[in-house]
Image (cartoon, helix red, strand yellow):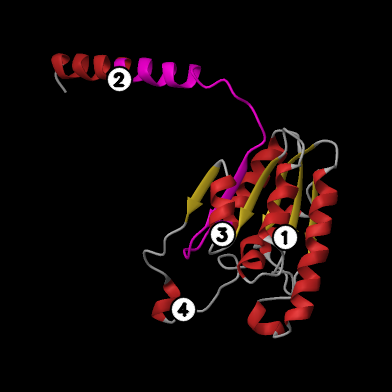
């Protein structure tokens, strides 16, 4: 790279830094965020557990409530449950097509939601992960309006992340951050089964 090219690059990056610094300085609001990880792609819960690790690393507590999952042991649960500051509750009974009992699924989701409401009031909790709550809402196991009211009533600095496919429009509207995972390519389509350390 010539001296002229190096100087042009330096000047370009200096201008970019000035723009970025001004953008960051303009952000003054601090609040507990409502985040939604949805979509048909893989990685919604995995991303939420990454946030859990980040919050624990900042010295703040984390609560996890799983609404549908819970009938099997997963790698992330095995590690995260051992970390100080994290409270984990797997309150589902497995995928809805496995239980085949709507009343049982509704009762399990109701218990999970009550636990989530309890956790929202825990002092020192920085993040609440509501794993697969979108599935419970999609199937009408919990009223969307009730869940939104509960989330709106959480402490001002408590972050919450909701995962699951088919996030209802009202949840998307209420959220501060919505990420949609898109299935560009998936190994299941090629006949590869679920594997330890990747899917669970």
In the image, taking residue 109 as reference, residue 190 lies left or right, namely: left
Q: Identify residue for label 2.
A: 13
Residue 80 image position (x, y, % from top left):
73, 53
Mark 2 or mark 3, earlier in chain: 2
Q: Is residue 32 one of those drawn in magenta?
A: yes
Q: CA distance from mark 1 to mark 2?
A: 42 Å
In the image, taking residue 196 as reference, residue 114 lies left or right, namely: right
Which disc, if any, is residue 192? 4
Q: Identify residue for label 1.
A: 77
In the image, taking residue 148 as reference, residue 119 lies left or right, namely: right
Residue mark closest to the camera, 4 vs 3: 3
Q: CA distance from mark 1 to mark 4?
A: 23 Å
The residue sitting at 70% across, 33% down in the picture is 58
Q: Quadrant of residue 120?
A: top right
The residue sitting at 66% across, 76% down in the picture is 95
The residue sitting at 40% across, 21% down in the picture is 20
Task: Check whether the beta carbons of the residues at disc 2 and disc 3 lie within 8 A of each other.
Answer: no
Q: Is residue 47 one of those drawn in magenta?
A: no
Q: Quadrant of residue 100?
A: bottom right
Q: CA distance from mark 2 to mark 3?
A: 41 Å
| Quadrant of image for the N terminus | top left
Residue mark closest to the camera, 2 vs 3: 3
Which span is picked out in magenta?
Answer: 15-44
The residue sitting at the front extreme is 145
104 or 78: nearer the viewer: 104
Q: Identify residue for label 3.
A: 168
Residue mark closest to the camera, 1 vs 3: 3
């Amino acid at each position: 790279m010539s001296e002229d090219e190096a100087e042009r690059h330096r000047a370009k990056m200096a201008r970019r830094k000035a723009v970025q610094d001004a953008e960051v300085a303009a952000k003054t609001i601090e609040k507990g965020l409502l985040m939604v990880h949805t979509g048909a792609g893989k990685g919604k819960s995995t991303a939420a557990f990454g946030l859990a690790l980040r919050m624990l690393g900042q010295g703040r507590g984390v609560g996890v409530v799983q609404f549908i999952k819970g009938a099997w042991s997963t790698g992330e649960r095995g590690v995260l449950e051992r970390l100080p500051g994290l409270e984990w509750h797997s309150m589902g009974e497995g995928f809805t097509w496995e239980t085949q009992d709507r009343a049982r699924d509704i009762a399990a989701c109701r218990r999970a939601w009550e636990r989530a409401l309890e956790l929202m009031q825990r002092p020192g909790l920085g993040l609440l992960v509501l794993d697969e709550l979108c599935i419970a809402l999609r199937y009408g196991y919990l009223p969307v309006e009730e869940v939104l009211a509960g989330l709106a009533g959480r402490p001002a600095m408590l972050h919450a992340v909701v995962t699951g496919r088919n996030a209802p429009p009202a949840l998307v509207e209420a959220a501060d951050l919505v990420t949609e995972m898109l299935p560009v390519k998936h190994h299941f389509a090629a006949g590869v089964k679920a594997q330890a350390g990747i899917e669970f």
